[in-house]
Amino acid sequence: MEIIIEYQIVSACLALVVLIYYTWRILDWAYITPKTLGKRLRKQGFKGNSYKLVSGDLKEMLQMIEEANSKPINLDDDIKRRVLAFFINIFQKYGALLLYVCWQFYAWSTPTVLITEAKLIKELMIPAFYLSCGEVLNKWEKSHSPEGSGEVDVWPYLQNLSSDAICRTAFGSSYQEGRNIFELQKEQAEYVIKASRSIYIPGWRRMTEIEKEVQSSIRGIINKRIKAMKAGDANNEDLLGILLESNFHEIEQHGNKSFGMTIAEVIEECKVFYFAGQETTSVLLVWALVY
């Protein structure tokens, strides 16, 4: 009986020690370290808003974004005051001496394929944009009678146009599978934007499901391509084919798989095809139409 009581006391003490340890770690991470860093920066001459637990400047930032977006904008207006309203306000309050840190880890040793040959870009991009533009123009023609006229909200069409063109360029013959992947990434991006404007993460479970589905779909496309390349039926008419071929040459040249990209790294590159090009291409097309 005494042994059991002693065991319970020891267990309770250990649990208390663990609880105190992790409570201190959380307190240090969430409050003590940020406050200490803030004091050190102020001693060095940096000025800024006081540290706020959990939410930080998020509430103030969201208010300024909503206020800026509620106002109309002309083509010759200063876009900085609309998209960087919070930072411009900080400059005005505290002066030009401002420190803004956004840290992210990059694996600089990861192999990278740079596609810069003009002829290759021309062969990849022009046919893809030709097909996608043709589809959009056909939809516009069918939406209005030949004799009449009407207005078209071009922004959704341009978003789909750039997405389709990039998808054809990236995945070629696997276009339909790639399009499904891009649709999932588009949905995921919407959740990420919502999460960046909130102290909690809405749609976290759905984001996890999307990530798994995207990973699985891209892996399936890659495995099919690898089998085709090994069978001698290589298709290098899209970015994925060029990426895989370049990766195989890199591995064969050095005789070691560590010199090439892993499947996981190839998957990440395929995901970048969408995020790096879709929005910028859509906006570029808008300005091309406006001017």
Image: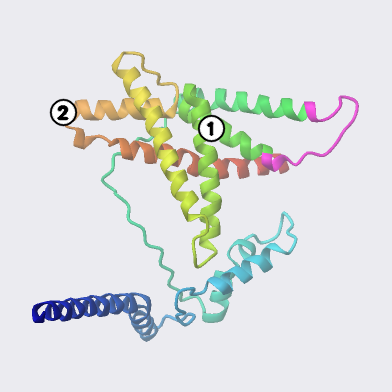
Q: Residue furthest top?
A: 232
Disc 1 to disc 2: CB gap under 8 Å: no
Seen at 56% across and 31% down, the residue is 165
Q: Residue furthest left?
A: 3
Percent across and percent down for residue 171 are 46, 28
| Distance (Cα) linking label 1 and label 2 | 35 Å
**Relative to residue 288, is residue 183 drawn left or right?**
left
**Relative to residue 130, is residue 38 drawn left or right?**
left
The answer to whether any part of residue 291 appears in the image is: no
Give the amino acid type for the residue marked by disc 1 in the picture: Arg
Seen at 28% across and 43% down, the residue is 110
Q: How many marks?
A: 2
Q: Residues within 10 Å of mark 1 (few under 14, many from 20)?
A: some
In terms of depth relative to the viewer, which is nearer, 273 or 177? 177
Q: Secondary structure at mark 1?
A: helix
Residue range of the region highlighted in magenta in the rendering: 142-156
Percent across and percent down for residue 246 are 31, 28
**Relative to 41, does residue 175 appear above or below in the rendering?**
above
Give the amino acid type for the residue marked by disc 2 in the picture: Gly
Q: Nearer the viewer, mark 1 or mark 2?
A: 1
Q: Residues within 10 Å of mark 2 (few under 14, many from 20)?
A: few
Percent across and percent down for residue 63 are 63, 71
- Give the quarter of the image for residue 155: top right
**Relative to 229, does residue 188 appear above or below in the rendering?**
below
Seen at 47% across and 24% down, the residue is 174
